[in-house]
Amino acid sequence: MKKINAEQILWRPNKKSSVPLYQQIFQFVCNNVSRGQWPVGTKLPSQRSLSKLFEVNRSTITTAIEELTSYGIISGKSGAGTEVISNTWSLFLPTTTDWNKFIATGFFHENNNIIQEINRLEFEPDLIRLGTGEIDPSLFPQEMWQKVLNRLGTKVMSLGYLEPLGLLELREALADHLNAEGLNVDADNILITSGSLQALQLISAALLQRGSTVYTEAPSYLKSLQLFQSMGMELSGIPMDNEGIQYWKLPRVTNKFNNILYTIPTNQNPTGITMSMERRRSLLDFCIENRLPIIEDGAYQELCYDDGQPKTLKSWDKNDMVIYLGTASKTLAPGLRIGWIVASKPIVQRLGDVKMQMDYGASSVSQWVLTEFMNSGLYDEYLEELIRKLRNRRDRAVRSLSKYMSDIATWNVPTGGFYIWLTFKSKIKIEQFFEQAVKEKVLLNPGDIYDFKHSRSLRLSFAYITEDEFERSIKKLRRIYDK
Amino acid sequence: MKKINAEQILWRPNKKSSVPLYQQIFQFVCNNVSRGQWPVGTKLPSQRSLSKLFEVNRSTITTAIEELTSYGIISGKSGAGTEVISNTWSLFLPTTTDWNKFIATGFFHENNNIIQEINRLEFEPDLIRLGTGEIDPSLFPQEMWQKVLNRLGTKVMSLGYLEPLGLLELREALADHLNAEGLNVDADNILITSGSLQALQLISAALLQRGSTVYTEAPSYLKSLQLFQSMGMELSGIPMDNEGIQYWKLPRVTNKFNNILYTIPTNQNPTGITMSMERRRSLLDFCIENRLPIIEDGAYQELCYDDGQPKTLKSWDKNDMVIYLGTASKTLAPGLRIGWIVASKPIVQRLGDVKMQMDYGASSVSQWVLTEFMNSGLYDEYLEELIRKLRNRRDRAVRSLSKYMSDIATWNVPTGGFYIWLTFKSKIKIEQFFEQAVKEKVLLNPGDIYDFKHSRSLRLSFAYITEDEFERSIKKLRRIYDK
């Protein structure tokens, strides 16, 4: 086993550099390993002698060693001495690829910690998830699911690759479904995707350019925005009022190619706002006039609890102005990983080609499951029942808020979807509030992870938890507020 | 409706440019539409007057108009006059995004036509697909599938999002399965992907860099190579002999960061060659010495028909040198869209993070189906039977070749997988041969779509068609050859 002679190391960290000392040491070790100077099995000098050699604190060495260990480059054993255990893939991790650069920087950077904490805490079993934008697993239609699987057992005879656009039977069922909602499409206008997130990825990869600007509601949906940024797009948030996006506040739209508008007009995430009929019409006119194409995210379109909901933008679209996105994740089950893109045929063709190069299409099993749900009528039956239940949850949620929050906060009453956007009347320290709530076993989604600036809002979801859990959480929040 | 006054058009195509005239005209129309000079509904001048105006042949105008129509930018109606029908998304199509640039150029460019023809012809029902690298749909285990679905109907209670690495039960089942094959992994070393193609995409996005060189066997697997190119990697083909890749022919490996080797050591696609034990050991030593990390594609690893198959490279890997890829597509069903990446934990973690940003994980339904197949023992039972059947097919295929081809061609006898690599002793005109075969209702995969240079080889697959279909096709090929 090779041992490094500390005296032969001439390199020293640069104490005047803006790069932290531990990172310089980390990089120095990486370089020696990657150049082959320190092959696998090489023993590193002790932490004490490294600290002396580099003239830095012992804690700086410890941090560098921990970093190297977490990347799998050296073994973490101390005492017997640390040694090099990898000289290849692990060394690729710290390098900055385009992708990593984009996910590490930008827009959400300052909130990364709280988002990561939410992601982690979502797997803790005894927290009440007051902000989760998913449907309550207990609302999953188990009996229907069983029927559907039993039928597919005899109906599906093999599971080969499907056509580039996805299972024809599913696209036909979706076309019927969408036409009943006022669209005018056929199966060839539809591309099945592995969820809406992938739909955005396909559009970004095939139609947009690095540096395209994506205009969107502020606040808006966390994860789609990250995707755009990962693909090198710029984001620009446009304020909303109760009728939806205030498109007239868009910066003077230049004719620069490939800027777009991304909107969730119905039951918006996270505000719950539904764009009015009037706003929809004038937005479309504005976009036609300014040649600003639209991605309409219809994730919550089917979840309307009151009468008189305006139709999709796509249903008034005569000019190929709108690409419409749908998904089964918000109604039936996210685990299906099935979404759909509705657009003109040349667009759908192109996106389908790109999809084939990414993953050869979405799961055939998932596509068959959704097809059977739709064609059997079970989906409509389920949806009706789901809407009834979620309407109850919304009504109870609003009552709970009135009971505990009316003097200290304001909120909208959403006409559908999952979300109530609650804003405190006076400033609160949102991070402390979040931490305090976690201690009380309530997991929150603070508003500042959706907005371009910090805020004193919360995204409340009444979809994931029961009416009683919602009320109990609100009561707790009030108590925390009063402390 | 706005009508264009042809006399006001001052632009003329540049006849000295290397850009074809029709393309200049196409771009001119696009520009006018995208700038808003010609809004939706604008009527274009007649083809005759355009031809006069631009001083070009009528056929040039026709080509430009056809192109504009196919992109959905103008209506194809003639007679009544063509008009602008879109001013947005369709105009994004002709622009060169990074992605399109990569898929349009490079490596496979010259063969694009034949690949596209194969893709198209695969949907023709009465062709015998002698080259298709999929498992025969009639070998799908219908009864087992039915059992599995029935059990999942009662076992699975909801379909939410899964952990970033994929369903724990599946990863545990795979770990057991892989450990039985000589690996030494646990569930945290495994990331479930939406097929192997996505695995390559994740590795490219998260670990490689634009300009990284991917060394690989020549000839090699068509679609993975395209993926690398789409992501901006360079490809370099290394020759093979009967024991596998001749790594000593690698160009002098520089220490430039993030070059890698991609290999299918077992039952290689398309040659059917299995790397010898000796070659595996010396390749690993070479890669360790040169710090050249390896992606080992084990797609055909489980499909070995003879005794004494060497173990995976990964099973000898002590240095984190190998990322191993597995898939259910070649054994059970491509429609599941399930693959897996086996690597060290830090690598798996990082790739899992990137996957979550791409599509939130693979279909839960597919993951449950495979889990149930594996945990019930049905998968092993099925695999044993499948190997028996495919061994028969291979044996019959080799006999058919001996009967009809032994004086004019050579081939290997593969010890597993799907493929026999047939090489004609004398030169043939491969494109004519391909077309002639299609006329005789046989669809071929010519060797030159897998290789860096043209060749006189064919990839024959005995997996997709029956023994008799194979023999009949070979008989036909002999007849075509003799003509």
Image (cartoon, coloured by chain):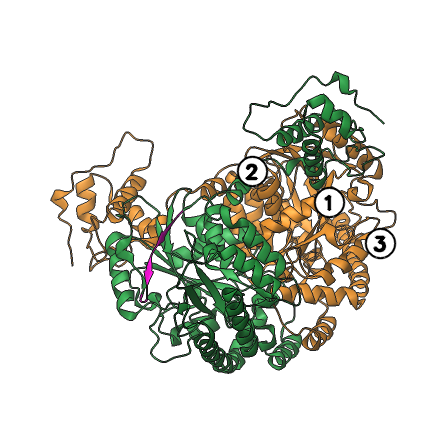
Chain colours: A orange, B green
Q: Are marks 3 and 1 on the same chain?
A: yes
| Residue B18 image position (x, y, % from top left) | 54, 28
Query: In terms of secondary structure, where does tag 3 sit?
Result: helix
Q: Circle 2 is placed at which residue position?
A: B97
Q: CA distance from mark 3 to mark 2?
A: 36 Å
Query: In terms of secondary structure, where does tag 1 sit?
Result: loop
From which residue to which does the magenta span run? B235-243
Of the image marks 3 and 1, the number of the one nearer the N terminus: 3
- Is residue A346 visible to us here? yes
Q: Circle 3 is placed at which residue position?
A: A180
- Examine the residues drawn in magenta and state their main secondary structure: strand
Q: Which mark is residue B390?
A: none
Instruction: Say which residue appears at 72% left-offset and 36% top-offset.
Output: B73
Q: Circle 1 is placed at which residue position?
A: A344
The residue type indicated by label 3 comes to Ala
Q: Are marks 3 and 2 on the same chain?
A: no
Outermost right residue: A308
Query: In terms of secondary structure, where does tag 2 sit?
Result: loop
In the picture, measured across the screen, residue B134 lies left or right of residue B160, that is: left
| Residue A223 image position (x, y, % from top left) | 59, 46
Dividing the picture into quarters, in which one does residue B117 lie? Answer: bottom right
Q: Nearer the viewer, residue B83 or A438?
A: B83
Is B447 drawn above or below residue A154 in the view shown? above
Callout 2: chain: B
Outermost front residue: B483
| Residue B277 image position (x, y, % from top left) | 29, 70
Q: Are marks 2 and 1 on the same chain?
A: no
